[in-house]
Structures are given as C-alpha cells and as structure tokens.
Image (tube, rainbow, N blue to C red):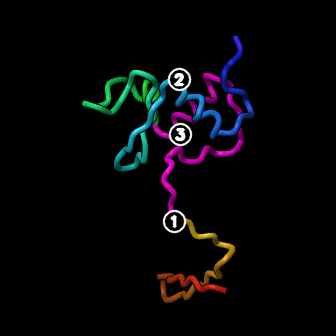
C-alpha cells in the first residue's frame, strides 16, 4: 500500500494530511510549545496515552513522520500554529556590539 505522505512532500502538506485523518494539536507549557495528538487522543481531561506513540512534541512528530511514512524532507518543519509571530528580518538591520568588561550590549539600528 502506498503511503499517503510522499518522501519529499513539504511539511505544510504533511500536516494538512495528518489533520485530514484526525490529528489535532493543543498548546503545551514549559519547554513544549505545542502537543500533537493522533486521532482519538487529546489534552482534554489530561493527556491519556504514551508520549512519542500517541502524542508528540514538534521534534517527536517529525521523527514519527520520518519513520512511519519514510518522509525525507530536509528542511525543519515550521510551527503548525497558524498565529503570526513578530519577526525581525536581520538583513534590514545593522547589529553593533559594545563590549564592556565581560558583558556585551547589542544595539539594533536601522540602516
């Protein structure tokens, strides 16, 4: 049987296919931004299941998809969260370092 996920498929397509078969995600806490759940597993009333078998953090989900579907996408998957984050494009700024004793202060100045 052919895998529904192709080896070089972009992560956006992989995640869309997982969503279509019932995968879900929910916010994490502490060191984990998000948890990703197989169909039938959720965070509601506490997570029931085994980590990296029934539910995953981002790294665990990527490893699972690589193993189960022979996915070989070389780029690290972006966050599946749809919220936009504030992003600074480094090429638009000049970063200057002012060294004082053992501390460093960085100033970001527009060009």
Looking at this view, name the residue that lies furthest to the top: 1
Is residue 90 placed above or below 34 in the rendered structure?
Answer: below
Q: Secondary structure at mark 2?
A: loop
> In the rendering, at what x and y percent does residue 26 appear?
39, 39
Q: Disc 2 and disc 1: Cα gap in Å?
A: 31 Å
Residue 43, quarter of picture: top left
Tag 2 residue: 21
Q: Which residue is label 1 attached to? A: 86
Q: Which residues are magenta?
A: 57-85
In screen coordinates, is 17 left or right of 81?
right
Distance from disc 3 to disc 2, alpha carbons, whole Å, reads 20 Å
Residue 22 coordinates in the image, percent (x, y): 48, 25
- Measured along the vertical axis of the image, is residue 30 above or below residue 48? below
| Res. 111 image quadrant | bottom right
Give the mark, 3 or 2, whose residue is nearer the N terminus.
Answer: 2
Looking at the image, the residue that sits furthest to the right is: 8
Q: Which residue is mark 3?
A: 59
Tell me: residue 75, above or below residue 17.
below
Q: Residues within 10 Å of mark 1 (few under 14, many from 20)?
A: few
The residue under the point 61% across, 44% down is 77
User: Which residue occupies the foreground of this view, 13 or 53?
Assistant: 13
- x%, y% of residue 102? 48, 82
């Amino acid at each position: 049987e052919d895998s529904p996920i192709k080896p070089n498929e972009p992560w956006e397509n992989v995640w869309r296919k997982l969503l279509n078969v019932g995968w879900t995600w929910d916010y994490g806490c502490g060191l984990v931004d998000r948890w990703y759940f197989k169909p039938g597993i959720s965070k509601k009333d506490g997570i029931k299941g085994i980590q990296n078998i029934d539910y995953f953090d981002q790294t665990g989900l990527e490893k699972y998809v690589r193993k189960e579907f022979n996915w070989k996408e070389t780029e690290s998957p972006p966050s599946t969260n749809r919220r936009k984050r504030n992003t600074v494009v480094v090429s638009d700024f000049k970063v200057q370092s002012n060294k004082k004793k053992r501390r460093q202060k960085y100033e970001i100045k527009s060009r």
